[in-house]
């Protein structure tokens, strides 16, 4: 299936297919290793939290940043 064909599908149908694909990947039980940089990002976040330099926001605050 080409990207052109996918774009012609209604959004609802594309989302359903995407969910089915994710389910099929999960059900196969294959684990893909996380990229090396994921560990670096998580370590940096942990350091900021432990040092008290991290800032947090509520889910509502986060949503409002996307509605601007």
Image (spheres, rainbow, N blue to C red):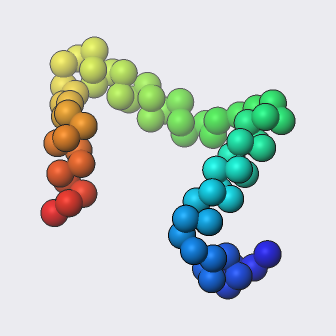
Quadrant where the image shows the N terminus: bottom right
Residue 44 picture quarter: top left
Residue 28 x, y percent position in the rendering: 83, 36
Q: Residue at x 19, y 34 (%)?
A: 57
- Up-down: is 30 above or below 12? above
Residue 51 x, y percent position in the rendering: 23, 17
Q: Residue at x 68, y 46 (%)?
A: 22
Q: Is residue 13 left or right of residue 39?
A: right
- Up-down: is 3 above or below 29? below
Residue 14 x, y percent position in the rendering: 61, 66
- Up-down: is 2 above or below 25? below
Residue 37 picture quarter: top right
Q: Is residue 68 left or right of residue 17?
A: left
Q: Residue at x 17, y 42 (%)?
A: 61
In front of the other: 13 or 64: 13
Q: Is residue 10 left or right of residue 64?
A: right
Residue 26 picture quarter: top right
Quadrant where the image shows the C terminus: bottom left
In front of the other: 3 or 12: 12
Is residue 30 visible to us here?
A: no
Residue 35 x, y percent position in the rendering: 63, 40
**Label tally:** 0
In front of the other: 53 or 14: 14
Name the residue furthest top.
50
Q: Is residue 3 left or right of residue 63?
A: right
- Up-down: is 68 above or below 53? below
In front of the other: 56 or 3: 3
Is residue 40 visible to us here?
A: yes
């Amino acid at each position: 299936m080409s990207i052109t064909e996918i774009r012609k599908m209604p959004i609802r149908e594309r989302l359903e297919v995407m969910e089915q694909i994710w389910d099929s990947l999960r059900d196969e039980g294959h684990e893909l290793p996380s990229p090396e940089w994921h560990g670096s990002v998580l370590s940096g976040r942990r350091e900021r939290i432990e040092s008290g330099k991290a800032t947090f926001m509520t889910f509502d605050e986060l949503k409002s940043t996307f509605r601007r």
